[in-house]
Image (cartoon, rainbow, N blue to C red):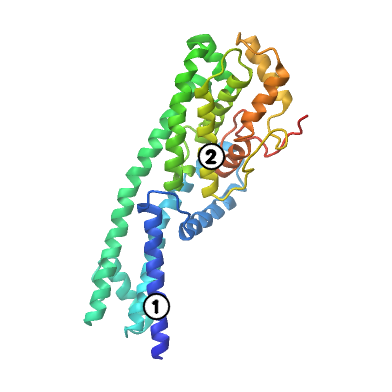
Amino acid sequence: MILVRILVFLLGAAVAARTIFSVIQSIVLPRAANDILVWFVFRTIRSLFKLRLRFSPDYAHTDRWMAYYAPVSLVSLLPFWMLLVTLGYAAMYWALGVEPFYEAYRVSGSALLTLGIAWSDEPLHAILEFSEGAIGLTLVALLIAYLPSMYAAFSRRETAVTMLEVRAGNPPSAVEMLLRYNRIHGLDHLTEVWTAWEVWFAEVQESHTSLAALSFFRSPNPEHSWVTAAGAVLDAASLTLAAVDNQYSPQAALCIRAGYLAMRNIANFFKFAYPPEPHYPEVPISVSREEFDQALAELEKGGVPLNSDREQAWRDFAGWRVNYDSLLLSLVHLTLAPESPWSGGRRYRLATQK
């Protein structure tokens, strides 16, 4: 019997310690850490939302429901962590002589929530009660401190996404972005856009891996999405480098690189498969040649100066797009992003190119 109690005590201590480690990885650690307990909560709630969305009549209904997914999952973490700590400490109380197990559970819950409705006068029990009470207060304090950091990062992300509507339309389109700059600002001013979005990609990479729930926070406007906004900017940079006459911009190339590196890091966090060193045409892209030619026709009609060699322009565009194509569509699928040219709503397919 003594051996059983020792094993139960060690098991309870391991459960409590693993829960605390989960909290540290998810809230305190300033780097990406894919914690299995957090993963379990988010996947479980995602499954429940999927059941509800099977009866969704349209995207607007889906968006309204999915807007609650990340907040509900995030709020559910605290009671889940508290439940595990309570059970872990209850096992330790029981191993130290608090019987039956229900009474050990009451002592554990009372200590964690600092209710004072149940306690034990044994010195060793008191040590456990004080430590558990400190854990309970720390969990609440950390979550309270965690939320402002998350919403600050969300606000910075969404400011750029909202501003993109002025430049690229709604939903955001790479073609529309180039047309508007050609009409209003002049294509030379696109350098400022590439610089700003290079910084944006760096911030998204850091925030969406260290604060992974941010990936699922949806924009206030149902037609906006951080994923489709990123896709529009990357496609605009790729079109500029590949097809616009005399508009090679090193900053556009840096923006594309920052974009696909950010997407790769987020994909690594969510364990998506993608080609590690993609090269076109060995790895095809989801944008067809017909779609590309149609885009060039619209740009030409709008007065954008284009390179005369359309075949080379296509190869150059595909060479840039292949770096982020599968990553972009995977994130669209993950976040259930809205319809958008060349990204949101596009079936995950690989077009056959020649």
For the residues labelled 2 and 1, say whether their Cβ atoms are less than 8 Å apart.
no
Circle 1: is it few (<14), some (14-19), or many (20+) Cα within 10 Å? some
Give the x, y percent position of residue 342: 63, 30
Decide which of tag 2 and tag 1 comes sooner along the chain. 1
Helix, strand or loop at mark 2 = helix
Whether 166 is drawn above or below 334: the answer is: above
Disc 2 marks which residue? 263
Circle 2: is it few (<14), some (14-19), or many (20+) Cα within 10 Å? many
The answer to whether any part of residue 186 appears in the image is yes
Give the x, y percent position of residue 210: 42, 47
Q: Residue at x 51, y 49 (%)?
A: 269
Q: Nearer the viewer, residue 51 or 105?
A: 105
Q: Quadrant of residue 332?
A: top right
Q: Nearer the viewer, residue 157 or 117?
A: 157
Whether 288 is drawn above or below 309: the answer is: below
Amino acid type shown at disc 2: Met
Whether 304 is drawn above or below 164: the answer is: above
Looking at the image, residue 144 sits to the left or right of residue 351; the answer is left
Amino acid type shown at disc 1: Leu
Looking at the image, residue 50 sits to the left or right of residue 292; the answer is left
Helix, strand or loop at mark 1 = helix
Kindly identify which numbered label has been placed on residue 43. Answer: none
Give the x, y percent position of residue 317: 65, 25
The answer to whether any part of residue 211 appears in the image is no
Disc 1 marks which residue? 10
Give the x, y percent position of residue 330: 60, 42
